[in-house]
Image (cartoon, rainbow, N blue to C red):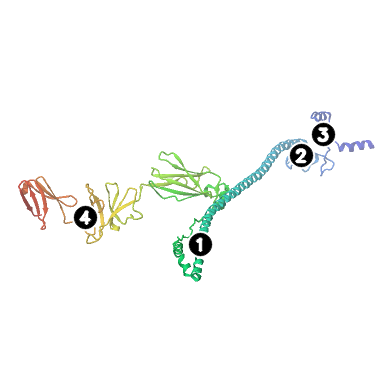
Amino acid sequence: MDALEVMNASHLRSHEVLTLDKYMEIESRGHLIVESKVFCSVHKDSHLEFYCDTCQVPVCYKCTIVEHRVPEHIHKNLHDVADEYKTQLKEMLGQLKVKEKQVEKEKSVAESTREEIQNQCKAEKLKVLTRAKEMIERVKREQKKLIDALDERSLMRLKDVAMRINERKFHLGNIVSTHHYLETLVHHGNPVHLLSTRTETMKRINEMVAMETKPPIIHDITKYDPRSDLAAHALMGVIKSDVCQSKCTVENIPKQLPKGESVKLLITTRDSRGKQIIPRQDVTVKSKNPDASWEDIDVTDNYNGTFQVMIVEKMVETHQVAVTIGNQHIPGSPFHIPVIRLVQKVGKTGEGQLSYPLGLTINKNDEFVTADRGNKRVTIHDRAGNYRQSFRFTDQFAKPFIPCDVAISDDNEYFMLDDSNNQIVVSDENGKMIRKFDKNDYVYVSSEHKVTKHDIHGRFICRIDSEKDRLSYPYGLAVCDDCKLAVVDYGNTCINIFVE
């Protein structure tokens, strides 16, 4: 072999010789790829042209015979595997590009959010500064107004005092000069001088002594009340935060609500840490109507994280109240409050407070008349619960008057059962006693052809009639001291006397 052949052999080992068809195929793709061969690290003279799919490594022809023999190993063309992997990489590159854009967009959104937060904070700070400036100007205006008002009132009072001072100073000067003149006259004047001015001097002295002594000036005191508004955080506005509905509470929920009464609820709003805050969301309270519809109730904002709402009973057996913040119910909402039929309480406090009341009736004025046993009186209240008057009958009986029941007759007489004296006391509507009777007293009634006997409650006991006792048109009657009954017998023109 000559030198040229050796050189050509060496040159061919390091380059790939393409067939004409292979060259035309590559050129048709638009570019010509020339790759240098890579030789096997084990078989130095063999280049890598296969791919062991089992071991996932490139191999040479000799490797497929020695280390990577079939059927244990599966061989593929190295370029085919590389092309397949390139296709896979291109797909992955497409997905990676999409992910790159997503992350880039998220980064851009985060940066925009950061800028938005900074701008929002700056804008809110500007609002605070603007509000503070407005309040400072307002405080200055109110300061001038208050100072001017104080000065005006003070100047008016000082003017009055100055007039009083000038007046007193004038009178004091007259008195001092007169006093000095008289002292000189007394010590150095002759009798002629003394007596010549006697009348005028005495008149002047009497006028000065009788001069009215005015009391000290009493002036109105003007005070500045600093109040607490200027120190209140709400003067310049408040900071609102997101609320955590599960941390919010409602206080003063009653176990039952008397019909016609109302109750004031206190709502406290808190954040997720349980800290009391002023909520950014709206606080809404609704009450369920008898027709199953819901009605909004006015809510009072205290601007400190608490709200007040007045609940008024409705014509339902159970009152339902829904409390929502940001359209979400707080724990326990809607609240169910049983309604009881009690509509009014009378005689709980004040002069008309009852003690162990027993009997009750209604008088002609539609007022409550109560046997107030514990207070030893009969007490009257109007329908609004206001105390009107009471009947006591102090020191009129052997024992203290203790009523246990009361009734009113058709002719407006008050019948009061006195438990202490075992008697019935009858009075007029003003408490003036008309009569009294005990368990031994009865009521006799004369009518045509008969006289009937009743107890004090009107229950019939017995009678005297014409058939048995020969009465004819009885009229008047009287009970004798020996308990015999005398009856005027008009028809028989006589007086008949009967034993009981």
Disc assigned to residue 174: 1
Structural crowding at the residue carrying mark 4, measured as other residues with C-alpha within 10 Å and reported as few (<14), some (14–19) or many (≥20): many
Which residue lies under the disc numbered 3? 33
At a point 16% along the width and 55% down the height, the residue shown is 441
Which residue lies under the disc numbered 2? 51
Which percent across, then down, holds residue 203?
Answer: 44, 62
| Residue 86 quadrant | top right
Q: Is residue 15 left or right of residue 111?
A: right
Dot placed on the residue nearer the N-terminal end, 3 or 4: 3
Dot placed on the residue nearer the N-terminal end, 4 or 1: 1
Dot 4 amino acid type: Ile
Dot placed on the residue nearer the N-terminal end, 4 or 2: 2
Which percent across, then down, holds residue 406?
Answer: 25, 52
Please state which of the two labelled residues, at mark 4 or mark 2, is closer to the viewer.
Answer: 4
Please state which of the two labelled residues, at mark 1 or mark 2, is closer to the viewer.
Answer: 1
- Say what secondary structure mark 3 lies in: loop
Structural crowding at the residue carrying mark 1, measured as other residues with C-alpha within 10 Å and reported as few (<14), some (14–19) or many (≥20): few
Dot 1 amino acid type: Asn
Which residue lies under the disc numbered 4? 424
Q: CA distance from mark 4 to mark 2?
A: 128 Å
Q: CA distance from mark 1 to mark 2?
A: 140 Å
- Say what secondary structure mark 1 lies in: helix
Which percent across, then down, holds residue 254?
Answer: 42, 50
Callout 3 touching callout 1 (CB < 8 Å): no
Between 364 and 301, the one nearer to me in the picture: 364
Q: Is residue 268 left or right of residue 63?
A: left
Residue at the extreme bottom: 187
Dot placed on the residue nearer the N-terminal end, 3 or 1: 3
Between 415 and 184, the one nearer to me in the picture: 184
Callout 3 touching callout 4 (CB < 8 Å): no
